[in-house]
Amino acid sequence: MPIRARLALVTAVVLWAVSFVATKVALESAPPLVVVSFRLLISAVCFVPLIGVTGGARRLGGWRGFRQLAVLSLFGAGLHYATQTIGLQYTTATNASLYTTTGPITIMLLSVMVLGEKITLRKAAGVVLAVAGVLVVMGIDTLRSFEFGNVKGDLLVLASLVMWGLFTVFGKRLTDELGALRVTAWVTVIGATWMAPVGWAEVRLTGFDVSSLSIEAWAAISFLGVGCSFLATLLYFVALGLTESQKVGVYLYLIPPLTAAFASFYLGETISLNLVLGAVLVFAGVALTERS
């Protein structure tokens, strides 16, 4: 894997790992879809100048290119964030954590069917190591407490992960045609356009007062918009343009142990032996997969 792709992915997953802490802070002051809407609007503002730099709509290949970007924005921005956030209201954090391990596997299977990529023995072994590492980080007590709670919430979280798999695989194809910067900018701006009316509707239905948002909440939402939806997503697509989608997807396994580490630092949670051993397995699995 090119060093640029590796650095881009490591930076992206670190930002996404911190995003869970930031999201927790934001949700203390605002409803979930309002948080998602502001997050995407802030990131869209960051991307608008880049759309001008990359030639605007003239370089999209006509209506066909714009239509592909609009569909992609649903999978990777609007519906993905909204579905996952709503699902978390009906299912447990334990369930959601376990379901995130299906994301890279979904990407691997879709990349074979859609892009014609190959699943080698080394790639499969790397995925197994990474999954084992995530499960070790969770610990036996967490796994024992797993149960299907509200089926609606479980299905929504799973659906959001399938959407991210589709976003990655089809985004890889479109990135090869249009370039990472152009694809990421348009997907985010279109996704913000989808979500703005949804966030406004939630404000109307819940009677939420936007002026009541705390400074901490605005700081968290700004980080989610600039650091995660803007920078991390851009870096993710840059890596997609440089290597296979399977190798990009397996880096997502780094998020659970990194999140646990950041939660320990910011929220005072304990760094356990499970975290250390699990992180070693995850890093080993990622390294094995990217070298296949």
Image: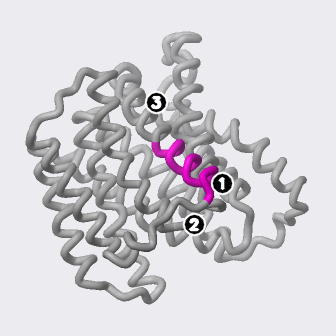
Q: Earlier in the sequence, mark 3 or mark 2?
A: 2
Q: Is 175 located above or below residue 2 in the figure? A: above
Amino acid under disc 2: Thr
Residue sitting nearer the eye, 157 or 44: 157
Tell me the mark number nearer the camera, choosing from 1 and 3.
Answer: 1
Residue 229: which disc? none
Provide residue 87's location: percent of width, then percent of height: 61, 54
On the picture, is 290 further left or further right than 187?
A: left
Tags 2 and 1 in contact by the CB under 8 Å rule? no
Residue 23: which disc? 2
SS at mark 1 in the image: helix
Q: Earlier in the sequence, mark 1 or mark 3?
A: 1
Find the distance from the CA under tag 2 to the CA under tag 1: 13 Å
Find the distance from the CA under tag 1 to the CA under tag 3: 29 Å
Residue sitting nearer the eye, 47 or 29: 29
SS at mark 3 in the image: helix
On the picture, is 129 further left or further right than 252?
A: left
Q: Magenta part of the protein: which range?
A: 150-161
Tags 1 and 3 in contact by the CB under 8 Å rule? no
State the residue position of label 1.
86
Q: Which residue is drawn at 30% across and 33% down?
A: 109
Find the distance from the CA under tag 3 to the CA under tag 2: 27 Å
Q: Which residue is drawn at 32% across and 45% down?
A: 104
Provide residue 49's location: percent of width, then percent of height: 56, 38
> Does residue 144 show up magenta in the picture?
no
Q: Quadrant of residue 279?
A: bottom left
Residue 182: which disc? 3
